[in-house]
Amino acid sequence: MSRAGIWQFLSFFIYLLAQVVLMKNLVLFNTAFCFIYIAFILFLPIETNILLLMVLGFLLGFLVDIFYDSLGMHASALVLVAFVRNFWLSRITPQGGYDAGEGPTLAANGLQWILIYTLPIIFIHHFALFFTEAGGFGLVWYTLSKVFFSTIFTLLTILLLQYMLPGQRRS
Amino acid sequence: MERLFYFFYQYRAFFTFLALELFAAWLIVENNQYQSTKFFNSSNKLAANIIGTTQGIKEYFSLRKINAELAGENAQLRTRLEQRNQSLYTLEIREVDDPKIINRFDFVSAKVINNSVERFKNYITIDKGALDGISPGMAVISAAGAVGKVKSVSDHYAVLISLLNTDEFTSSMIKRTNHFGSINWDGKDPLYSQLNFIPRHANPVVGDTVVTSGFNAVFPEGVLVGIIEEVSLGPEAQFYDLKVKLAQDFSSLAFVEIVRSNLLEEKDSLEQVTIGESK
């Protein structure tokens, strides 16, 4: 296994623990949740096989579900993220394409690109997650407000992490 | 046939996606069934250990408050015991002679290691399980009032379905008028719940006490649920919309008591027999 591979393997568990130990206890104003574990799927290398992505997504979501007592919900939302990720990546390819072996990171592609990349995917994930949890569209506006504020919270946390992680940076 | 395989191969991403999503959907539906002894939830040993450690750290920050609450509860129980002794002494009676009836319920104390109030379906994990005699379906109360029911157990841990869960219905009644209804959370404010199915003629007022009804035999009768905070009645509605301020503040839940109902089986089988005969 390459060095990057080992790092990715470890990051799977780091994201899982960060989610269930830290972020689970951090809910702002009863509405803003932070689902940091999406970042694992988001920042895997660009050429990662979509089948592998989905299986990893299911696995990670399933493990998160165990801690949240919400069997299947995080798993289904994260599989959705893994499914749309590569399509979205190929849609927003910057001029000149991606560098080989590069992750879709802030360091490699800049702030504007990373916003365009992460925002819709985080939104889709939170939308799917909160509406399955609510069990339908009974509380549309309340649920939407949860989706909205949580998207901002997760986005900011992910961006912050991208600025802070030095290992990924390559200039 | 070859074409078919080629078709599947071409769209393998989509079909894998579909398969995984269907599997997840099945898990969600399966998990929503009330009462299950499942392995994949937070009563799982490893998960509960991790959560328990986190909770242990978190607890240090609220020790003062928990202490104060427990001391308050102690004082309250002492007062009540003394009042009961006094009234029994002056009346010169004992309520019930049958020790089985007196010991109908017993209580197991447990510590909350995992709790949430922000989601639509909130669950609580506690540090007592099957080895302490806890089984799915038992009622859980705290010093302040009703908390929920046991959903699933492992050897050392149990997952409770909290009153703050949109799937949970608890048979309750208005103490003053004895009208029955059902407590069901609307998923919004963790301090308030709704009392449904109170008929038009019941005339509930703000400040009425809502207690468990004991009709389901899970909860002992008369456990405090909350106090009516808002009363509204639509012009054509059959039932009142009642907003109930919950007695238990779920965001600061530290210790709970599991109610073991020793005569539950007898009551259930008696009812079963009676219902069977009436057919």
Image (tube, grey):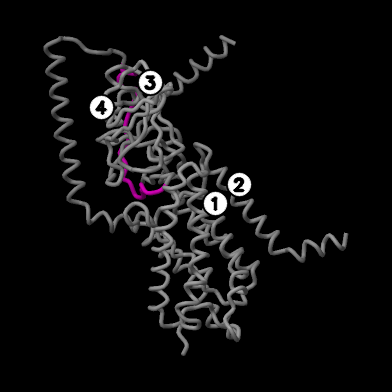
Which residues fall within the magenta stretch?
Answer: B99-119
Residue labelled with disc 2? B26
Spatial distance from mark 3 to mark 1, Cα to Cα? 35 Å
Residue pointed to by mark 4:
B206
The image position of residue A27, as x and y in percent, is 35, 56
**Proximity of marks 2 and 1: CB atoms separated by less than 8 Å:** yes
Q: Image quadrant of residue A29? A: bottom left
- Residue under label 3: B180
Tell me whether circle 4 and circle 3 mark residues in contact (CB < 8 Å): no
In this view, the mark in front (3 or 2): 3
Amino acid type, callout 4: Val
Name the spot of residue B124 as percent of width and height, x first: 38, 45
Marked residue nearer the N-terminal end (4 or 3):
3
Crowd band around label 4 with a 10 angstrom C-alpha radius: few (<14), some (14–19), many (20+): few
* SS type, badge 2: helix
Towards the viewer: A141 or B253: A141
Chain to which the residue tagged by mark 3 belongs = B
- As helix, strand or loop, the secondary structure at mark 4 comes to loop
Instruction: Give me the C-alpha separation between circle 4 and circle 3.
Output: 17 Å
Asked if badge 4 and badge 2 are on a common chain, one would say yes
